[in-house]
Image (cartoon, rainbow, N blue to C red):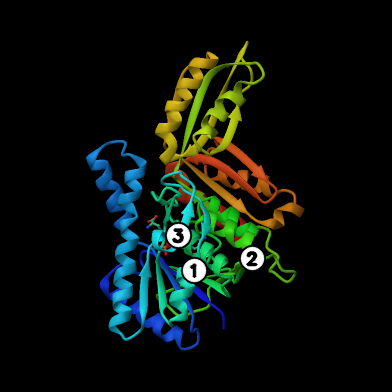
Amino acid sequence: MGIVVKKYGGTSVGSAERIKEVARQIIKAKEKEPEIVVIVSAMSGETDRLIALGHEICSVPDKREMDVLVSTGEQVSSALLSMALIEMGCPTISLNASQIEILTDKFHTKAKICKINTDRIMKELSKGKVVIVAGFQGITEDEDITTLGRGGSDTTAVAIAGALQADICEIFTDVDGVYTADPRIVAEARKLDIISYEEMLEMASLGAKVLHPRSVELAKKFGVKIHVLSSFVVVHGTIVTEEVADMEELLISGVTANAKEAKITVMDIPDKPGMAGKLFSALSDVNINIDMIVQSETRGKTNDISFTVDETDLQKTIEVVKESVREIGAGEISYDRDIAKVSIVGVGMKSHSGVASKMFKSLAEHNINIEMISTSEIKISCIIRISAMEEAVRVLHKAFFDTH
Ligand code: ADP
Ligand code: ASP
Ligand code: MG
């Protein structure tokens, strides 16, 4: 047996009792898996608490300092888990991103891992120790602390599994696998035994927070097999891997929703070449990702452009767009936080027609208005009112999965 990487999320290490329980599980696993590296999240609620605390001090906290603040959550849980294991007689060491050298770029609060030095982890493993790593954090070349974006401990785990060429990366969480929809919204959701990287990446990017999107991207890149499973019940979970020939042929594999986007509309943009280019390159220069874009019909010599961004980027987006609007001579800017995106995902869509019309019809039958649409080969997304989000997920799940 080679190295096994195990990641425990916030709820799994949410209390002293839970941390002791995880320690017991690791000791049991070590009987069969001698080389274990564990990645931990902060105790549940801790990252939210730290972010709120930052915002109590100032309305737009400095991002570098925010990373210093929120990265502490994972250090607390890694130390506590390590203490629990040592107390139970299992040689263990906790390490943070700077001790290991988990190098990232400089984009505070959403940094990307560039390189991991495996020397220290290998040295500690060779001494027979379980290595506990604080997830979610990294360091820049200048030794500044960064974080990888909400849910980023999954990415720490997969990146370390890739760097160590581990046999498997197990993601222990509070559900027992990846479902056809969030089981907290759709009681009838089905657990998937296996899902391809491609579909899982779409689902994660479109709001299925069970895995951080970047973790799936890295798993695909480095061929890391992921097993998503529960730390509360012992059952086989969901394997995320290359597409294999005998995978179940589903038309769609999941319904997802994301409430954390905001829509910005820029009015009266001159109808001439280069305007959209100017608007969006200014945003990409500051690392803001644009999701959906819709341009209106031309009225006289102008048109309007609406687009969506991650809610956390709204303030910065407005600042940057204001500047561009001045430059290109466009009109008013408005924004709307009360939107949500519902999506259906599945490679089966590639070879079937009528999927989009079925989605639109199902939403219409429940009086859910579609404000924006975007499609790719394997997904269709609609922007709707946030108040209709959960109903929309249930409606779409019923339309595509209810075979009775
Ligand atoms: P952790 O703290 O372990 O990282 P998260 O809260 O980040 O856990 O992710 C697990 C949660 O993801 C589940 O509790 C579930 O509500 C949610 N979730 C959303 N979509 C799905 C899905 N398709 N399958 C399973 N869980 C999902
Ligand atoms: N603690 C971080 C968060 O709450 C990272 C994680 O849990 O993966 O977003
Ligand atoms: Mg998570």
Residue sitting at x 46%, y 78% = 125
Looking at the image, is mark 3 or mark 2 earlier in the sequence? Answer: 3
Q: Is residue 188 above or below residue 388?
A: below
Say which of 191 and 219 sits in front: 219
Disc 2 target residue:
223
Say which of 207 and 71 sits in front: 71
For this orientation, the residue located farthest to the left is: 57
Q: Pointer 3: residues within 10 angstroms few (<14), some, or many (20+)? A: many
Amino acid under label 3?
Answer: Glu
Residue sitting at x 51%, y 65% = 160
- Mark number for residue 119? 1
Write down the quadrant of residue 216 in the picture.
bottom right
Amino acid under label 1?
Answer: Asp
Mark 3 residue element: loop
From mark 3 to mark 2, how far is it between C-alphas?
22 Å
Say which of 311 and 183 sits in front: 311
Classify residue 53 as left or right of residue 218.
left
Residue 265 horizontal/vertical position (percent): 50, 26
Mark 2 residue element: loop
Number of the front mark, 3 or 2: 3
Disc 3 target residue:
101
